[in-house]
Every structure is written in structure tokens, then in C-alpha cells.
Image: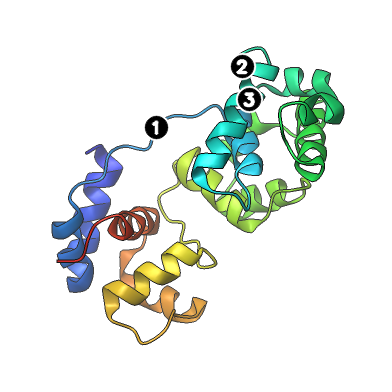
């Protein structure tokens, strides 16, 4: 494990016995891989409301249409019509074209987002069509590698909390924030552990 995964897991295990047991069951986290910022946002838009398999297939076609590299400049050149030829829905093609135009023009500076705090990043990204709070939180966790993000609106996280803590129903945001209070400042690590727990068969 890298420092943040190791430190975060130890921190959480010391403070939360439920999570300590979960960590023993799911094993260590691998480091979140580095991703180009624009490509990560494009992949997020492509993956909205479709299965992981379908999203991967469409993204592969998008990459081919973009000449092998999904960049703002290449998608801006394609425009909505060119994006649609990659099998992307009209709405998502519009979102991608808008994102590409704003980044290519310098209206949105993805290269400066690391200078902002979490709330400022969310504010900047949700101003872009097709990107909501959840998308911005995924960017914080997996692209900027921010350590203390808990996406309470994520259905998988709600289900994982319910299963891990033996709750009768999926918890509300306030309940999840209370349960995870002792994880701070490593709630992103806790989030990834909870997602991982959904992939592991209960003992």
C-alpha cells in the first residue's frame, strides 16, 4: 500500500472496530492510479447511467475517434456530431463537446484545480454541464487523490454502510457522516474500503 492507503487504513482501524473487521476481510487497498484530468472527466460523462462494461466499450470508441488520445483539443475538433459517431448519446455528446470547448479555450483550467480546496473544486466542476456533485467527488478521490471525501449520495456506499454496520435500511447522509466522523481525515480511504467490501463475499 502507498502512504495514504496505509496511513488511512490504520487510522480508521484504530478508531472504528466495524471497519477494522472489514479491513481484515477485504485486504489492503492498492494505490489509485494516476489519470489525465480531462480524460478522467470525459470517462465520467461517458459512464453515467450505463453499466461499467458498456461505458468501457463506448470510451474505447471515443478514444479511437479522438485518434488514440482523449484530449480537450481533439474532442473540441470532433464536436457533437463527430462524438455521436463514436456511439455516444446526443446528450452526452453535447456535454463532452461543452467540456472540451471550455477546457481547450482556457475557460476551465483543470491544471489548476489541485490548488483549490475540495469545495472549490466541486463548485468549479459542477458549473460544467453534465458534471454533478458525485462526478466532482470521484474526481477528488481518484484524480486529485484528496484523502477526506465521502460521497454520501453514492448508492454503493449506502449499501456498503448498511451491510457493514448491520443497519435495517440504507442510511441517510447524516447517519453516514456520523458513522464516519472518526475516519477523518481519511474518509476517501474509508470510501474505497466500503466499495471494496461490496466485491467481497461476506464470510
- Residue at the disc numbered 2: 69
Nearer to us of marks 3 and 2 is 3
Q: Which of the 4 quarters of the picture holds residue 157?
A: bottom left
Q: Name the spot of residue 158 as percent of width and height, x first.
A: 44, 70
Residue beneath the point at 66% across and 42% down = 45
Residue 152 lies, with reference to residue 149, above or below; the image says below
CA gap between label 1 and label 3 equals 22 Å
Q: Give x and y (percent) for residue 42.
A: 65, 35
Q: Is residue 141 left or right of residue 184?
A: right
Residue located at (63% from left, 49% from top): 48
SS at circle 2: loop
Using the image, determine if residue 64 lies above or below residue 170.
above
Classify the position of the C terminus by image quarter: bottom left
- Label 2 neighbourhood size at 10 Å, few (<14), some (14-19), many (20+)? some
Q: Earlier in the sequence, mark 1 or mark 3?
A: 1
Q: Quadrant of residue 68?
A: top right
Give the quadrant of the N terminus: top left
- On the image, the x and y values in percent for residue 13 come to 19, 63
Q: Quadrant of residue 108?
A: top right
Q: Earlier in the sequence, mark 3 or mark 2?
A: 3
The answer for how far apart the CA atoms under marks 3 and 2 are is: 11 Å
Q: Secondary structure at mark 3?
A: helix
The label number, if any, that marks residue 197 in the structure image: none
- Of labels 1 and 3, the one closer to you: 3
Q: Earlier in the sequence, mark 1 or mark 2?
A: 1
Tell whether 188 sits left or right of 1: right
The label on residue 61 is: 3
Local packing at callout 1 (Cα closer than 10 Å; few below 14, some 14-19, many 20+) is: few
Alpha-carbon span between mark 1 and mark 2: 18 Å
Q: From the viewer's perspective, tell me whether residue 53 is left or right of residue 193.
A: right
Q: Which mark is residue 33?
A: 1
Where disc 1 sits, the SS reads: loop
Amino acid at each position: 500500500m502507498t502512504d495514504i492507503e496505509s496511513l488511512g487504513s490504520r487510522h480508521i482501524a484504530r478508531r472504528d472496530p466495524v471497519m477494522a473487521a472489514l479491513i481484515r476481510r477485504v485486504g489492503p487497498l492498492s494505490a489509485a492510479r494516476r489519470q489525465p484530468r480531462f480524460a478522467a472527466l470525459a470517462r465520467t460523462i461517458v459512464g453515467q447511467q450505463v453499466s461499467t462494461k458498456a461505458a468501457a466499450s463506448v470510451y474505447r470508441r471515443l478514444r479511437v475517434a479522438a485518434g488514440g488520445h482523449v484530449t480537450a483539443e481533439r474532442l473540441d475538433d470532433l464536436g457533437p456530431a463527430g462524438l455521436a459517431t463514436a456511439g455516444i448519446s446526443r446528450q452526452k455528446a453535447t456535454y463532452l463537446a461543452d467540456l472540451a470547448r471550455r477546457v481547450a479555450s482556457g475557460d476551465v483550467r483543470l491544471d489548476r484545480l489541485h490548488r483549490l480546496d475540495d469545495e472549490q473544486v466541486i463548485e468549479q466542476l459542477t458549473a460544467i454541464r453534465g458534471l454533478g456533485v458525485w462526478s466532482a467527488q470521484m474526481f477528488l478521490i481518484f484524480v486529485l487523490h484528496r484523502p477526506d471525501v465521502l460521497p454520501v449520495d453514492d448508492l454503493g456506499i449506502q449499501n456498503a454502510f448498511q451491510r457493514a454496520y448491520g443497519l435495517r435500511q440504507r442510511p441517510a447522509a447524516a447517519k453516514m457522516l456520523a458513522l464516519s466522523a472518526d475516519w477523518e481525515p481519511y474518509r476517501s480511504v474509508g470510501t474505497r474500503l466500503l466499495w471494496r467490501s461490496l466485491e467481497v463475499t461476506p464470510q
